[in-house]
Image (cartoon, rainbow, N blue to C red):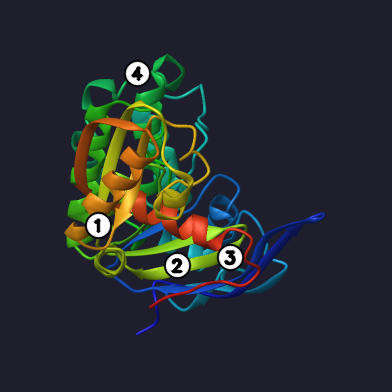
Amino acid sequence: MPAAIQLDNVQKRYGALHALAGVSFAVEEGDFFGLLGPNGAGKTTLISIIGGLTRADGGSARVLGRDVVTDYRETRRLLGVVPQELVFDPFFTVRETLRIQSGYFGLSKNDAWIDEIMHNLDLTSKADVNMRKLSGGMKRRVLVAQALVHKPPVIVLDEPTAGVDVELRQTLWRFVSRLNREGHTIVLTTHYLEEAQALCKRIAMLKQGQVVALESTASLLARFDAAQLVLHFARGRLPEGLVDRAVEPETALVSDRVALRLTAASDVEPILQACRAAGAEVDQIAIERVDLEDVFVQIMDGARGSTQPVVTH
């Protein structure tokens, strides 16, 4: 069985900028896959290549075994892409927009599925409203509906909940999770790492156009499974000798709230003793478990300055 998405040494340059520097990984059919990274990491460029909007300078991208360049018609039928930007036609209603989108894929009798999509995205009451009169959140719901209108087996969501309310996020994730349970492959990029942790089975992290981590979400969390000691200083700051334990070492010496990595419970007292010896006064202490955001920060920090991908399986 071919992978839902197969990327082999994908490269892309924009002048002197190497946006993608040899990205390779596979997304298996039925997966809920997270593509994470800081701004400028190459996520949207990669999605544009998969979706056929941008052509790679090197390497190959396939969707269910079809090359996105040589089999571009078929790969577009297999994909549903939700872009970051709010792009819409101001001359049509919501229902007309979805019917036109259906027509692009040769679907002339698609109203039952359109009604189901609108119901699940809470768009039914807006079906006959002109697109330009919708709020930003409602326009984003229509973008999601457009991507789903032809029932694509592979769905790519590029920051679908950026700047939208909690209601839309919950509505969208209920529907997308249902589609995933029914066999659709989902690829998600998001800066809301709690979403990725809750939804994604596997994750790839990009930094400066390279893959710096690639494994299951559970494995990522287990590999960094440790506690953090969070200290709030009423007076003084963290001693320099403890900076190497800090989750964010660049701000550890100037912040009054610092998170430190723990390897064992017995680490706590020596840390507090070192703070007291340095004249710092701690007025709040908490021990927290590592989450995906903590893992993300540690991996990005570990990849800083690296010229080679650090890929784990």
Residue 10 shown left or right of residue 164 in the figure: right
Q: Which residue is mark 3?
A: 210
**Neighbours of disc 4 within 10 Å: few (<14), some (14-19), many (20+):** some
**Foreground: disc 3 or disc 1:** 1
Judged by depth in the image, the label closer to the viewer, 2 or 4, is: 2
Residue labelled with disc 4: 129
- Whole-angstrom CA distance, mark 2 to mark 3, is 9 Å
Residue type at numbered disc 4: Val
Rendering coords of residue 270 (x, y %): 27, 53
Q: Give how far across and how far down residue 70 sits, in percent.
A: 62, 73
User: In this figure, which residue is indicated by the disc labeled 1?
Assistant: 267
Secondary structure at badge 2 equals: strand
Query: Which part of the image, by quadrant, shows the C terminus?
Result: bottom left
**SS class, disc 1:** helix
Residue at figure coordinates x 22%, y 55% from the top left: 179
Q: Is residue 285 above or below residue 165?
A: below
Front tag of 4 and 1: 1
